[in-house]
Image (spheres, rainbow, N blue to C red):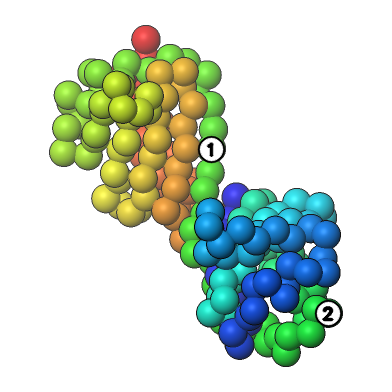
Amino acid sequence: MLITLLLIGQRIDLKKLTLHPRNTEYNPKRFSAAIMRIREPRTTALIFSSGKMVTTGAKSENASKQASRKFARIVQKVGFNVKFADFKVQNVVGSCDVRFSVQLEGLCIMHAQFCTYEPELFPGLIYRMVQPRVVLLIFVSGKVVITGARNQDEIDLAFKHIYPILKRFKK
């Protein structure tokens, strides 16, 4: 999944934006952005009054760009002069299942400089990898979430580094 940023190029009146499209919600008491959703590609945009738009949920950079263009077109149809500028991938998130249980306590002890594990606060171990600079959430079930990557190569490299470590702590 990708998280991308797009600068629309002008301030947006979020109340006006949410009057017309059915796929848009805005509750300033809960969150400072308007939330817009589309089905294809299945994505969500957070549109801020500053003109910044964050798109989440796309499975590839092309899908994210396509979704961002669709969101920009919707904003344009409401009456805002939109520019498609500075499209940028902010974060790539990957998830996988290693298909074996992991001894999180042992992993945390042996890799203490990289790990935080407080099961009473959060069920997963937080592993802060130095190279590539990503954060992994590792669960007893063997499920792993990799976040903070700038591209798919960093996700692949992080998994390549962590998999042999996880195998050593297989339950």
**Please, what secondary structure does the residue beneath circle 2 have?**
helix
Q: Which residue is mark 2?
A: 77
Q: CA distance from mark 1 to mark 2?
A: 36 Å
Q: Which mark is residue 25?
A: none
Q: Position of residue 147 (x, y in %)?
A: 44, 48
Figure quadrant of residue 12: bottom right
**Quadrant containing the C terminus in the rendered view:** top left
Q: What residue appears at the point 47 percent right and 37 percent down from the top-left corner?
A: 145
Callout 1: 10 Å neighbours few (<14), some, many (20+)?
some
Which residue is rendered at x = 74% and y = 56% of the image?
A: 37
Seen in the image, is 144 located left or right of residue 123? right
Q: Position of residue 167 (x, y in %)?
A: 37, 21
Any part of residue 84 in sight: yes
Q: Position of residue 146 (x, y in %)?
A: 45, 43
Farthest residue to the top: give it.
171
Q: Which residue is mark 1?
A: 95
What x and y, as percent, mark residue 75? 75, 76
Nearest to the eye among marks 1 and 2: give it: 2
**Position above or below: 47 against 155:** below
Q: Tag 1: residue type?
A: Ser
Q: In the rendered image, is residue 168 in sight?
A: no
Mark sitting earlier along the chain (1/2): 2
In the image, 149: left or right of 107?
right
Q: Amino acid at mark 2?
A: Lys
> Which of 161/81 is in front?
81
Q: Residue, x 53% and y 54% (percent of image)?
A: 30
Eyeballing the image, is 115 above or below 168?
below
Marks 1 and 2 in Cβ contact (< 8 Å) = no
Secondary structure beneath label 1: strand
